[in-house]
Amino acid sequence: MKIDLSNSGITESEIKKYKKDLEKAHNYIYEKTGVGNDFLGWVDLKYDVTELERIKVAASKIRKQSDLLIVIGIGGSYLGAKAVIDALSHTFNPKNVIFAGNNMSSDYLNDLLDYIKDKDISLNVISKSGTTIEPAITFKVLREYIEKKYGAEKAKDRIFVTTDKEKGVLKELANQKGYETFVVPDDVGGRYSVFTPVGLLPIATAGINLDVLLNGVYDAQKKYSKLENNDCYNYAIARNILYKKKKKIELLVNYEPKLHYVSEWWKQLFGESEGKDGKGLFPASVDNSTDLHSMGQYIQEGERTLFETVINIKKPYRDYTLNCEQNSMDKLDYLNGKTLNEINHKAMEGTIIAHTRGNVPNIILEVEKLDEANLGELLYFFEKACGISGYLLGVNPFNQPGVEAYKKEMFRLLGKV
Ligand code: PA5
């Protein structure tokens, strides 16, 4: 993949001005001297073969014994897996991995209980802290359901726990009941955990090739580790330059519906990492061309506080050539012989021209094809850019103190002692 800043209004010399700050941020990461330095495990994360094998074996056991794996987790404990699975799966084929415990809707839970009634299921409950209320409630309900359905002994084989290596309620429960457990590394925060067992077990269960995905990540670790000519660092710098130019909102734009959850994952990554100390770009997203018909007006002519980062997937898996008769009633002759991918790209190019003219700077990220290796690279690119960008902004990109405030009020209202 590569970055194109030619529509961002950012000059080479503006980027160069960040040389010293970038060096500092880079050293914060590689010398572990910055704030939040105990959460840098994702930077050079490597798998030992045995652990990866254990994940693959568990995934194949789940696939054999179940129609469905229900992944129970919230925030960083589900968005990465959901993003990867959606991006790499057939849009309409029913999925064998579904997600719960990411909300407290009674309708969602009841609908889920209806849906699984005649299906064989396994559970993968994921919580680093082991105490998060949404997955805790859903896990309690589904654990009781599964124990009733299969009996306590057999249920044990259908429950997989991903949590801290030694502490937390979930770990205690897993030890007591004898569930198979996977570890969320101490030095990896939820939103940076997609390439740990948090993401990998659900992803492998969905039938996605972990080796190819991880090779993409390992290549990216190398590619984006150098101080100079680093697209990932240029993206981090460009965001900070635009923020200083009074752009307050970054819109992640895609033209591929399968990327919807990549945007959801990206929003958490950047929002939770940078939105603190009264600072930070607000990360938002649009799915085009769909949202050009809803949000397009605002982007073109609303408040000029936006810039866009466009993910341009160059080649589809399968293209579709239009055959349009001359002079037919539908007046689509001008599209005759064109492919849908070509048309989608013209919509993208036209939108970039129009938005840029409308004073919405555009950063383009070019990705050759939406496959395992490129997706691994793209997600790592964002993680690394986020760490660097947060340091350039002057915040700790690895903590999230603000998420405790609402919990305190909620627990007080619920009478938790
Ligand atoms: O990035 C984060 O730290 C959060 O989004 C967490 O992943 C989320 O709150 C879930 O936490 P836990 O895994 O402890 O249940």
Image: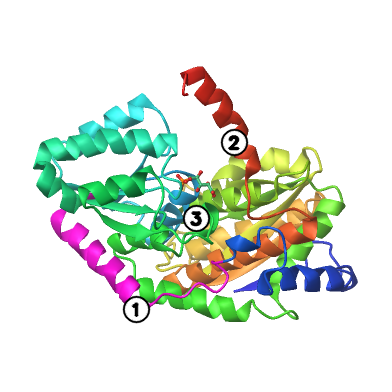
In primary-sequence order, the first of circles 2 and 3 is 3
| Quadrant in which residue 319 is drawn | bottom left
Distance from mark 2 CB to nearest ligand 1 atom below 8 Å: no
| Residue 4 visible within the image | no
Between 114 and 363, the one lying in front of the other is 114
Nearest to the eye among marks 2 and 3: give it.
2
Q: Position of residue 333 (x, y in %)?
A: 52, 57
In primary-sequence order, the first of circles 3 and 1 is 1
Q: Position of residue 398 (x, y in %)?
A: 63, 55
Q: Decide: few, some or many residues near mark 2? Use Cα within 10 Å; few <14, some 14-19, many ≥20.
A: few
The magenta region covers 41-68
Magenta-span inclusion, residue 53 = yes
Nearest to the eye among marks 3 and 1: give it.
1
| Residue 317 visible within the image | yes
Please name the residue that numbered disc 1 is placed on: 49
Q: Main secondary structure of the magenta part?
A: helix
Q: Position of residue 184 (x, y in %)?
A: 43, 58
Q: Is residue 375 left or right of residue 237?
A: left
Please name the residue that numbered disc 2 is placed on: 404
Residue at position x 44%, y 50% from top?
128
Residue at position x 61%, y 47% from top?
285
Between 273 and 110, the one lying in front of the other is 273
**How many numbered marks have been drawn onto this rendered protein structure?**
3
Q: Amino acid at mark 1?
A: Val
Please name the residue that numbered disc 3 is placed on: 259
| Quadrant in which residue 187 is drawn | bottom right
Q: Is residue 174 left or right of residue 397?
A: left
CA gap, disc 2 to disc 3? 29 Å
* Residue at disc 3, secondary structure: helix
